[in-house]
Image (cartoon, rainbow, N blue to C red):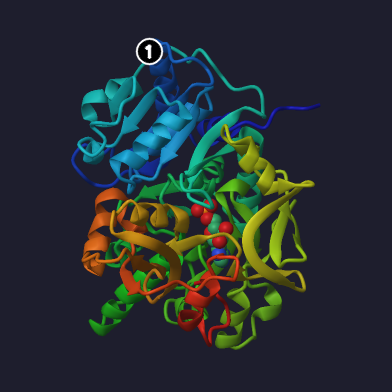
């Protein structure tokens, strides 16, 4: 028997088994949805699909969403993708022009917008714009059943735009089969059970929340929304909601550790000892932070590694029983490696030191970019662009082959920032690299050669970028130089620019 693996499995199981249970607790703000049960989540997802039917949005159409974490976003994960349309989750920190590019490139005809971002995207052209507020909640209350229901596991769930090796972001096309397998595998490795309470510290737009919302829904997990990363507020939610599981980038760990230190200074207890597990990825976490999370907070630290292109789970590093008696610093060092292959994943390293991966949840391709797809998947192996090696079964990431900077868990394409600097009439040459940063892991650093007679200052160049790019992509430092290091053939030697900043470190990424 071959039954297609589609997201509807997760939603319908939750409705059947956990119908009366609170599914999502929205951020407690005006216009929030409060607590909704899994029965309501299912009904609202179907109603959203039926509302798109009423607008004559056909199966296969792309529906963009620009929103911080919210209950309505989680409803859309199912309401769009399980009933035949393709979700295009957009990083809401992008500027309006960057969002316009994604909407246009994906061909989205509908854009769902959180009320906070209404003004921000007002000028982005799209056929149907729906503000996700109380006024439009009628779209979540229809009773007509949806016209479409996905039955083909190869159908596309979402196109997730990710910054990489090209000046413009590429659209990663993920199928129902990939998302299904990723969710089940992820849920299994992390041990998601129906006793868990999950805090949404990871942005849902980021690879559909790493696919975790699908796994959580299947198991009837209570999900708590948080819209902004604030260490003190995260601790408060963990305490009041009984949270047991959260995901985030190393920058979120740093915010939590700072907030926990303040609590201890005030003599207040830090919640979660022995009950919370935190899954960290996006960049390599410092081993000191891992040790502190385990020793000071008593939380379990789990590292995963993956990319949007791989749905994302490739490896997992979770302390096995054999490490129980290992002293904390050594345990943290072991946990600072990316981890062992997840079930169904095979890893290899190319002769040039690039990590390669194969699995059933590697993507189908970049949307309408066959050349980029062919560059990424060669002879059945996905080229991650990450440099590293295998330490026994453990993948260790030491370097980045692709020209990408990861700041606070968000990818920044160096080429895109260089392009922006070149738009300034007084810039002759620009090279953008990532340099270590205590809070964000890496920060964007630009070396610029000005044209003869130019008068622009470093600060003015930063301001120039901030007018044109999302702020997380902008250089925090610009150094004006007489020349850039190049090979005899004129090729820029970024490694020489990076050297002084990364010298003495074990790895060249942070
Ligand atoms: P994204 O597609 O935005 O999720 O970014 C994927 C990239 O994040 C990978 O190619 C890595 O460079 C980086 N990354 C993700 N997880 C880890 C990790 N655990 N350690 C080091 N780098 C990571």
Q: Name the residue under label 1.
A: 55
Q: Is residue 419 left or right of residue 266?
A: right
In which quadrant of this rendering is ligand 1 seen?
Answer: bottom right
- Residue 315, how many percent across, how many down? 65, 60
Is 178 situated above or below 143?
Answer: below
**Residue that sits furthest to the front in the current view:** 452
* Element type where label 1 sits in the image: loop
Q: In the image shown, does 486 or 265 lie closer to the viewer?
A: 486
Q: Residues within 10 Å of mark 1 (few under 14, many from 20)?
A: few
Asked which quadrant contains residue 501, the reply is bottom left
Residue at 36% of width from left, 70% of height from top?
256
- Residue 69, how many percent across, how many down? 35, 45
Q: In the image shown, does 396 or 35 lie closer to the viewer?
A: 396
Is 58 situated above or below 340?
Answer: above
Instruction: Answer yes or no: is residue 277 visible.
Output: yes
Q: Quadrant location of the N terminus?
A: top right
- Residue 226, how many percent across, how many down? 33, 52
Residue at 51% of width from left, 46% of height from top?
207
Is 51 situated above or below 406?
Answer: above
Is 318 situated above or below 157?
Answer: below
Label 1 C-beta lies within 8 Å of the nearest ligand 1 atom: no
Asked which quadrant contains residue 68, the reply is top left
Q: Is residue 350 left or right of residue 308?
A: right
Residue at 44% of width from left, 47% of height from top?
222
Instruction: Answer yes or no: is residue 20 visible.
Output: no
- Residue 341, how many percent across, how many down? 71, 60
Number of callouts in the render? 1
Q: In the image shown, does 298 or 161 lie closer to the viewer?
A: 161
Q: In this view, does 30 lie to the left or right of 390?
A: left
């Amino acid at each position: 028997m071959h039954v297609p693996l589609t997201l509807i499995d997760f939603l319908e199981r939750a409705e059947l088994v956990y119908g009366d249970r609170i599914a999502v607790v929205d951020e407690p703000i005006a216009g929030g949805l409060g607590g909704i049960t899994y029965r309501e989540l299912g009904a609202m997802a179907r109603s959203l699909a039926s509302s798109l039917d009423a607008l004559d949005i056909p199966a296969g159409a792309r529906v963009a969403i620009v929103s911080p974490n919210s209950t309505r976003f989680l409803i859309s994960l199912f309401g769009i993708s399980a009933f035949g349309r393709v979700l295009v989750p957009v990083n809401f920190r992008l500027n309006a022009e960057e969002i316009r590019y994604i909407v246009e490139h994906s061909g989205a005809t509908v854009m769902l917008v959180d009320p906070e971002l209404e003004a921000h995207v007002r000028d982005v052209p799209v056929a149907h714009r729906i503000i996700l507020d109380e006024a439009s909640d009628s779209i979540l209350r229809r009773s007509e059943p949806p016209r479409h229901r996905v039955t083909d596991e190869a159908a596309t769930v979402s196109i997730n735009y990710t910054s990489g090796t090209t000046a413009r972001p590429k659209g990663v096309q993920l199928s129902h089969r990939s998302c299904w397998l990723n969710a089940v595998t992820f849920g299994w490795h992390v041990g998601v059970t129906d006793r868990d309470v999950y805090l949404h510290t990871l942005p849902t737009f980021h690879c559909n929340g790493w696919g975790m919302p699908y796994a959580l829904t299947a198991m009837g997990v209570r999900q708590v929304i948080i819209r902004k990363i604030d260490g003190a507020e995260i601790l408060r939610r963990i305490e009041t909601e009984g949270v047991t599981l959260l995901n985030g980038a190393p920058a979120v760990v740093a915010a939590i550790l700072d907030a926990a230190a303040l609590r201890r200074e005030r003599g207040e207890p830090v919640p979660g000892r022995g009950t919370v597990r935190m899954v960290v990825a996006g960049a390599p976490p410092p081993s000191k932070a891992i040790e502190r999370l385990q020793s000071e907070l008593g939380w379990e630290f789990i590292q995963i590694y993956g990319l949007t292109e791989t749905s994302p789970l490739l490896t997992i590093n979770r302390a096995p029983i054999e490490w129980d008696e290992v002293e904390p610093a050594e345990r943290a060092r072991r946990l600072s490696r990316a981890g062992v292959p997840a079930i169904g994943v095979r890893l290899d390293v190319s002769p040039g030191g690039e990590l390669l991966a194969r699995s059933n949840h590697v993507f189908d391709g970049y949307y309408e970019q066959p050349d980029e797809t062919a560059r990424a998947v060669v002879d059945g192996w996905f080229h991650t662009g990450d440099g590293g090696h295998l330490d026994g079964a453990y993948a260790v990431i030491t370097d980045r082959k692709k020209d990408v900077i990861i700041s606070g868990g968000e990818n920044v394409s160096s080429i895109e920032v260089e392009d922006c600097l070149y738009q300034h009439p007084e810039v002759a040459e620009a090279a953008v690299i990532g340099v270590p940063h205590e809070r964000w892991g890496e920060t964007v650093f630009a070396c610029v050669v000005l044209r003869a007679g130019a008068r622009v200052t470093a600060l003015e160049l930063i301001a120039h970028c901030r007018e044109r790019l999302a702020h997380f992509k902008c250089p925090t430092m610009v150094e004006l130089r007489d020349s850039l290091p190049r090979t005899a053939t004129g090729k820029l030697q970024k490694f020489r620019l990076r050297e002084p900043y990364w010298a003495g470190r074990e790895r060249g990424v942070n």
